[in-house]
Every structure is written in C-alpha cells, then in structure tokens.
C-alpha cells in the first residue's frame, strides 16, 4: 500500500510547497494534514506569520486534497481561480 502523505510530499519537491517548507503529515481522499514551521522568512515581524503564507498553505493543502480525488487518467487537473480569506484578529 502506498503512503499517500509521502507521495504528496514528493510531488511538492522542487516546487512552491517545498520552498514554503510544508510537511504533509497524513493524507487520504477525505483529509490532508500538513504542517508549516513558522520561521522569520515567512513572517511580517518575527513570530507573526504573513497572511500570504497562511493563504499559500491553505491553497497548497486544498490542491493536494483535490489531486487525491481527481481522475488523472481522464486528464483532469486543478487550479485556483479565486481564494479569499478574512483575518478577523491575530
């Protein structure tokens, strides 16, 4: 049996998800769990993660979950058309 988390982690190699430092902890067609270590390069000020990094994490996880459910044999693919997040408070 293939470990889907490992497959998704390898799929990010050399791409934006790897650059961000996303680690896929678990993956199944109905759930993807990932982590992002907050480091200064991703912050607006030390210790405060930039909203763009949060959005990038959410978009990447959404894409990974979608890919797990696509019929790639039929040539289906995915892209983000629009994404909105409202940060109410820190």
Image (tube, helix red, strand yellow):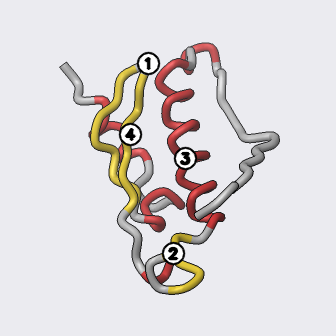
Nearer the observer, 50 or 1: 50
Q: Please tell me how crowded label 1 is: few (under 14), some (14-19), or many (20+) other residues with Cα within 10 Å.
A: few
Q: Is residue 52 left or right of residue 22?
A: right
According to the picture, the residue beneath numbered tag 2 turns out to be: 48
Q: Nearer the viewer, mark 4 or mark 2?
A: 2
The quadrant in which residue 63 appears is top right
Cα–Cα gap, marks 4 and 2: 27 Å
Q: What residue is shown at x 77% (from left), y 46% (from top)? A: 84
Residue 51 appears at what percent x and percent y? 64, 64
According to the picture, the residue beneath numbered tag 4 turns out to be: 8
Assign the N terminus to one quadrant of the image: top left
User: Which tag, 1 or 2, sits closer to the chain's start?
Assistant: 1
User: Which tag, 3 or 2, sits closer to the chain's start?
Assistant: 2
Cα–Cα gap, marks 4 and 3: 11 Å
Q: Nearer the viewer, mark 3 or mark 2?
A: 2
Specify the label residue 60 is tagged with: 3
Specify the label residue 30 is tagged with: 1
Q: What residue is shown at x 71% (from left), y 38% (from top)? A: 79
């Amino acid at each position: 049996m293939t470990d889907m988390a490992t497959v998704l982690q390898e799929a990010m190699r050399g791409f934006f998800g790897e650059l961000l430092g996303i680690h896929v902890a678990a993956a199944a067609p109905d759930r993807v769990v990932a982590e992002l270590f907050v480091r200064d390069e991703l912050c607006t000020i030390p210790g405060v993660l930039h909203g763009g990094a949060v959005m990038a994490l959410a978009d990447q996880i959404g894409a990974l979950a979608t890919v797990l459910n696509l019929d790639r044999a039929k040539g289906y693919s995915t892209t983000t058309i629009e994404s909105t997040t409202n940060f109410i408070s820190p």
